[in-house]
Image (cartoon, rainbow, N blue to C red):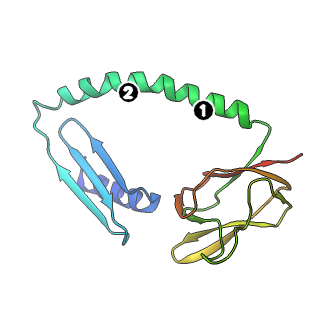
Amino acid sequence: MDIKEIQNLIKFVAKSGASEVKLEMDDLKITIKTGSDSEVVPQVQYAPVAAAPQIPQAAAPVAEKAAPAEAAAPKAAQDDTSKYLTIKSPIIGTFYRKPSPDKPLFVEVGQTISEGDVLCVIEAMKLFNEIESEVSGKIVKVLVDDSSPVEFDQPLFLVDPS
């Protein structure tokens, strides 16, 4: 991995909003941590070549055992939520359920909404973007905690359209 690839990786992690990313290769170990002030702090370590074969062998069995359990969980969740519409985040940012700390929630579970109703705000780069509903229905579930970071296309709400 050359310096240009490392720089691109740092930029990608900074834009994604992840707080920490670790990457281990045969002769290279990279940890990228982003702080609360949006600074990216890369740490690059070159691992001894003799130790590299031991790391993948130890990690591989754990990953193989975890994959089937993770694959079963989303299938069960999809069956339960297949009749609901999912409202997803159109941008990366911080999810807020209230317009300000002293105001009431935009929407609550069980509340009926219609097209154009404001469901939440997402703060991105010090701008608060109102997220409006594109469907009518009843809020079944809020999938994100207040003041949590959200990714692009991350599910925010489940709505029963009936």
Q: Nearer the viewer, residue 80 or 48?
A: 80
Q: Given the image, on which type of amino acid does mark 2 rest?
A: Ala
Where residue 67 appears, as percent x and y from the top left, is 46, 26
Where residue 47 appears, as percent x and y from the top left, is 14, 41
The image shows residue 110, relative to residue 49, as above or below, that is: below
Where residue 70 appears, as percent x and y from the top left, is 51, 29
Name the residue: 74% across, 54% down.
109
State which quadrant residue 59 falls in. top left
Q: Quadrant of the C terminus?
A: top right
Name the residue: 11% across, 34% down.
49
Q: Nearer the viewer, residue 48 or 96?
A: 96
Q: Residues within 10 Å of mark 2 (few under 14, many from 20)?
A: few
Total marks placed: 2
Q: Image check: 8 left or right of 132?
A: left
Q: Which residue is mark 2?
A: 63
Q: Given the image, on which type of amino acid does mark 1 rest?
A: Pro
Camera sees residue 80: yes
Q: Image check: 86 left or right of 29?
A: right
Q: Which residue is mark 1?
A: 74
Q: Residues within 10 Å of mark 1 (few under 14, many from 20)?
A: few
Q: Nearer the viewer, residue 122 or 24?
A: 122
Q: Image check: 107 left or right of 72?
A: right
Q: Earlier in the sequence, mark 1 or mark 2?
A: 2
Name the residue: 78% across, 49% down.
159
The image shows residue 139, relative to residue 80, as above or below, that is: below
Residue at the far right in the pictured view: 162
Where residue 145 appears, as percent x and y from the top left, is 57, 57
Which secondary structure, mark 1?
Answer: helix
Gap in Å between the C-alphas at discs 1 and 2?
17 Å
State which quadrant residue 46 falls in. top left
Camera sees residue 53: no
